Image (spheres, grey):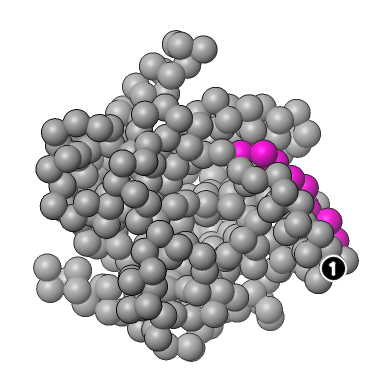
Amino acid sequence: MLSALLSILAETFPGNKYHWHQSTDLPDQTGRVHLVTGGNSGIGFEAAKCLLRANAIVYIAARSADKARKAIADLKGETGREAHFLQLDLASLASVRRAASVFLSKESELHVLYNNAGVMFTDFKLLTEDGYDLQWGTNVLGHFYFTQLLLPALKRATGGSRVVNLTSWAQHMTGELRFETCRPGPARDAIAGGKYELYASSKLGNAVFAKEFDRRYRGDNIVSTLVDPGTIKTDLFKHSKVWELLTRPIMFDRSYGALNMLYAGTSEEAKDHGGKYIAPWATIRSPNPQVNDAALGLRFWEWCETEIKNFEATQ
């Protein structure tokens, strides 16, 4: 408990000193393809803006076509360059499959995938289209399936590729990862922390996925990292105004939120950070100890694969 508390404090109050920043250190990305889930708002938007300024080919994957097109117009106004829209609803495995198919029909290579989109503190009763807890289904299983479907393009990327998985200091705040809480039932109903604990569980799930992905695909020249973007002023808090009011005084501007993900996705030194946890600001720290449990990583992977196979069997 003490180590978790110290980690949370260090990640919540990192100060404003950094050795790498996107405004000065982001390498030229000419010819490189970047895909940002949730790139129409918040830190995903900030990341897309910086990548466009660095001459990258940028895809914004989002659920709302109207919001994405507005974001793309705003980005063009700010950068002079145009991003591409990819329709993606992570709360629908069918939508995830369509989105991956569309992307692969347009691009043969994917250099960096940012698994950035997510929901936080949503109503306990809300489920995905496929019947999973909305936070787990969107934040974890949707990204797991999307990443797996995009593997051909990640493996073909010239010079190697990277998968940047956003987690949070909340991954320190949960106990054992229990897959039976991902669907409605007695185990889920018995969760004392309700939607808050389910969110923390999803962030731990993101971290476990990133680590296990690194174990499996490091030999394919794919670098997978775990990234905490920091406590940032975005609309992610819209489902818990009380929590937003409590934490707003310690929040950083959303431009800071893009720093860690862009560091993981573009910096030369991050090529050696496969499987590592990048905390604010561009600092390697220790994740929840469960993340390094290879047995848990295997169970996580097998559980996700089984759920995906069950879905595909119905299509």
Occupied quadrant, residue 285: bottom left
Q: Is residue 249 left or right of residue 261?
A: left
Q: Is residue 108 left or right of residue 191?
A: right
Residue 312 seen in this snapshot: yes
Residue 84 sits inside the magenta stretch: yes
* 91, 294: nearer the viewer: 91
* 6, 44: nearer the viewer: 44
Quadrant that contains the N terminus: bottom left
Q: Is residue 162 left or right of residue 292?
A: right
Residue name at image x 45 percent, y 56 percent:
166
Few, some or many residues within 10 Å of mark 1 (<14, 14–19, 20+): few
Residue 170 sits inside the magenta stretch: no
Residue name at image x 54 percent, y 80 percent:
253
The magenta stretch spans which residues? 81-88
The spot of residue 293 in percent (x, y) is 22, 46
Q: To which residue does mark 1 refer? A: 77
Q: Answer above or below: position of 129 versus 297.
A: above
Q: Answer above or below: position of 139 versus 237.
A: above
